Image (cartoon, helix red, strand yellow):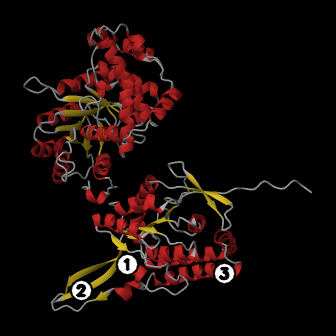
Amino acid sequence: MAASRVDVRKTYKLYIGGAFPRSESGRSFVVNDAKGKFLANASLASRKDARDAVVAARKAVPGWAGRTPYNRGQILYRIAEVLDSRGDQFVAELVRTEGVTAAKARTYVEAAVDRLVWYAGWADKIGQVVGNANPVSGPFFNLSSPEPTGVVAVVAPRGPLLGLVSVLAPVIVTGNTAVVLASEAHPLTAITLAEVLDASDVPGGVVNILTGTVSEVAPWLASHMDVNAIDLTGVTDPELATDLERAAADNLKRVRRAPATEPDWLATPGIDRLTDFLEIKTVWHPIGV
Amino acid sequence: MPATASTAQGSASSPGIGAYADVTASEASLRRFLHGLPGVDQVGAEARAASLGTRSIKTTAKAHALELAITMVDLTTLEGQDTPGKVRALANKALRPDPADPTCPSVAAVCVYGDLVGSVKEVVGHQVNVAAVATAFPSGRASMEIKLADTRDAVAAGADEIDMVIDRGAFLAGHYLQVYDEIVAVKEACQRADGSHAHLKVIFETGELQTYDNVRRASWLAMLAGTDFIKTSTGKVQPAATLPVTLVMLEAVRDFREATGVQIGVKPAGGIRTAKDAIKYLVMVNEVAGPDWLTPDWFRFGASTLLNDLLMQRTKIATGRYSGPDYFTLD
């Protein structure tokens, strides 16, 4: 029998601007599996990686927001396709990192695919639901329509795949770009998802994923003047959540507050995650009399 | 660091440019001199520029560098679509780059086409210099009369500085004396009625000079012709300013001062967009030419987008949080 093959040990990097760079700080941290055994090294993002990610996200806004909602829906659907075809890989990864059974992991992966399809469907419908032709007492057409808010920072929740997809999809489907700070406990699945995004026609910079410590990086995103909104779903420390909200107030960021308890990600969501990161634009147009 | 041209030019006892009168006396002697300059070690120059670019400048030194870089900016707009209104807006920005912060210094100059000098002058008065590009910018392809008229018009309109382009075609063809005579003639055209003269910057368009040896020759040629500044590029040709090219030019001005006692300024222009880049240039100025050049009188950045990045980094240091382009003027 031949000598056993040498393992290919994967190094998990960041996902910024459509590329997979190491942290500029050169730091990494050890990620263990559910049994406490070494699993892989992941990049420990610094404030400068967050800065670079925001620059990449800002650069991607005009192109992404300028696409038709239909096209964004198609791209989300494409993410679902690619994720589905790599389902086994995600199942195996969830079993190792979370220590759940294969059947349970399969439920999460399938729910994540379905969640993407669900949000993909909203792409060209949200405008009709939250937009309106307003009745006004004057000779005007008065139309309100939702517009993406811009760059959204997301502190992802613990659920490594379903949780992440459930907070990411609603942000980008309406035309925002995202800087995601992956769950501190389960960073690897986020980077594997980045590989899926990278293969799904998602333009570089629309989604940027950082792995590292929430308390180190999140404050820089919260105070960043070029970030338009922040989703604190994954912040578990109430004191940190308050600090982040306070920092976010400096440029009047939209803030989605940290939930009191981890939401049930398997339940069908409402559209509040979509509408939280939209601005309503109202146009007054004179009617020729 | 590799020793360069200084040895070839004789003693350091400051004999002045006059000592080179025989060099510029004829085409043959000028060519002999320029081709006698030591060649530039291309790999060495690029490696040195790259290694100087890795210096980490932090905290108070960084704050100082950003402040200095702002005062060195020649805020530039050289578009066919420039209007008097647009250059007035730019001139206002030059005076008060960050309207939210009165401690923010003004830039060094506003750089525009000659016909817009008056519009800028109305706004800035004597608080900020006005630089005008002249001599058939950016190609430099026009008759001598037109180039000189271009220069005189700009000076008459009140330009404090003239950025001229050399005739690269003549330079590359080896007609060095023609290029020399042109610079001398434009320098004369910079004279004002009261005897003072507008500062002359000579643009080489290093992206078209092909080799570092040519950049060194062009530098010496312009310096011998009496320029006040040597400038890399018009910004219309890629590559524009690069670190190695600027390194070669900084070595030239350093060696020229050693040989003649005359100090010449350097202005990289085009392609410098981030504060990080600007700081790399400042490190290089300090290391290659020396701290004497670290003032707006002797070193400038020709740039437009650079200023906003400098302001954002400056604001970041002041407030402790990252700033964004939404908070600075579009230009």
Q: Amino acid at mark 3?
A: Lys
**Residue at the right extreme, as displayed:** A1
- For disc 1, the chain is A
Under tag 2, what secondary structure?
strand
Marks 1 and 2 on same chain: yes
Of mark 2 and mark 3, the one earlier in the sequence is: 3
**Mark 3, residues whose alpha carbon is within 10 Å: few (<14), some, or many (≥20)?**
few
Reply above or below: B235 against B322: above
Q: How many marks?
A: 3
Q: Which residue is mark 1?
A: A276
Residue toward you, A234 or B181: A234
Residue toward you, A150 or A257: A257
Q: Amino acid at mark 2?
A: Asn
Residue placed at 26% from the left, 32% from the top? B143
Q: Which residue is mark 3?
A: A104
- The span from disc 1 to disc 3 (Cα, nearest Å) is 30 Å
Q: Which residue is mark 2?
A: A142
The nearer-to-camera label among 1 and 3 is: 3
